[in-house]
Amino acid sequence: PRTAAVIPAAGRGLRLGPGAPKALRTLNGTPMLVHAVRAMAASNAVSLVVVVAPPDETAAVKSLLSDLVLPDRTEVAVVPGGANRQQSVRLGLDALPEDIGIVLVHDAARPLVPVDTVDAVVEAVRDGASAVVPALPLADTVKEVEPRPGGPEPVLSTPERARLRAVQTPQGFDRETLIRAHGTVADDGEGATDCAGLVERLGERVVVVPGHEEAFKVTRPLDLVLAEAVLARRRA
Ligand code: C5P
């Protein structure tokens, strides 16, 4: 079966500060989304990339990606996104042709994921896992709190750090499992922040494979500095 990558890229990126939708902001002159599409297309396994664009930027995204030179095996499709990540992913899944058996879901906000990480996720799905997430151990200790805007916030618990993983993308799924998860778990308004969480809610097994530090999510202004430094190091 063929493998497709769905790239939710419809977020506004408010935490990055004012400006264009996050996926269209540039890293060393190239929009983050273009880096993310290239990162998926770099995998020999991926033959289709479905980009879920900000609804009012769909035409701009189509024209941006039509100029892109990608390997011959790779088709690109662009569809308009929804109000939260869960809805955007679902709209991307609706655009998948029948012959796709494995689906990767990859945040446009993780433009620098290395191809080895993409391949490792695909490999784990091919080996029989229905849901695979790349993840890394945490550097920080994490506390669960009672949220109180403005604080101070009472601490409820301290999960054992060695048992925690920070989850990245691409997450990989057997197509049927992912579509069933998105069809079964209702959107609570905020939407799920990762697809694997929906699969967990079905009671199905999700497994973790090693992630990569360069697969970090560009969320805040400092992340832009780091991402440009990583690109500069790759070119050196
Ligand atoms: O906001 P967050 O960083 O969790 O977003 C993760 C990914 O989901 C980003 O690539 C963002 O563009 C995407 N997203 C989306 N549609 C939305 C909100 C977020 O495709 N409505």
Image: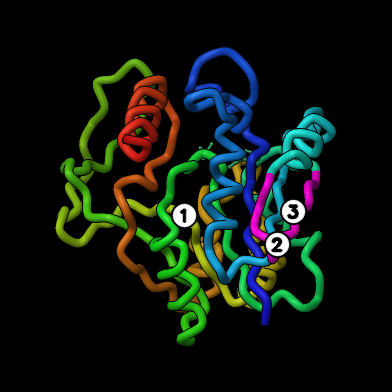
* Labelled disc at residue 169: 1
Q: Residues within 10 Å of mark 1 (few under 14, many from 20)?
A: many
Give the mark nearest the N terminus, 3 or 1.
3
Residue highlighted by disc 3? 76
Q: Tell me which residue sits at (56%, 68%) in the image.
A: 44
Answer with left or right where residue 42 lies relative to residue 134: right
Q: Amino acid at mark 1?
A: Thr
Q: Is mark 2 within 8 Å of ligand 1?
A: no
* Callout 2 secondary element: loop
Q: Residues within 10 Å of mark 3 (few under 14, many from 20)?
A: some
Q: Residues within 10 Å of mark 2 (few under 14, many from 20)?
A: few
> Which circle, 3 or 2, is nearer the viewer?
2
In the depicted structure, whether residue 120 falls above or below residue 32: below
In the depicted structure, whether residue 214 falls above or below residue 167: above
Q: Amino acid at mark 2?
A: Asp
> Which circle, 2 or 1, is nearer the viewer?
2
Where ligand 1 lies, by quadrant? top right
* Residue 177: % across, % down: 62, 76
Give the mark nearest the N terminus, 2 or 1.
2
* Callout 1 secondary element: loop
Q: Tell me which residue sits at (75%, 59%) in the image.
A: 75
Residue highlighted by disc 2? 72
Q: Amino acid at mark 3?
A: Val
Q: Which span of residues is magenta-colored?
A: 69-79
The span from disc 3 to disc 1 (Cα, nearest Å) is 19 Å
Q: Tell me which residue sits at (55%, 73%) in the image.
A: 202
> Which circle, 3 or 1, is nearer the viewer?
3
In the depicted structure, whether residue 214 falls above or below residue 211: above
* Residue 157: % across, % down: 20, 46
Q: Tell me which residue sits at (57%, 29%) in the image.
A: 30
Check the image and name the residue furthest to the right.
59
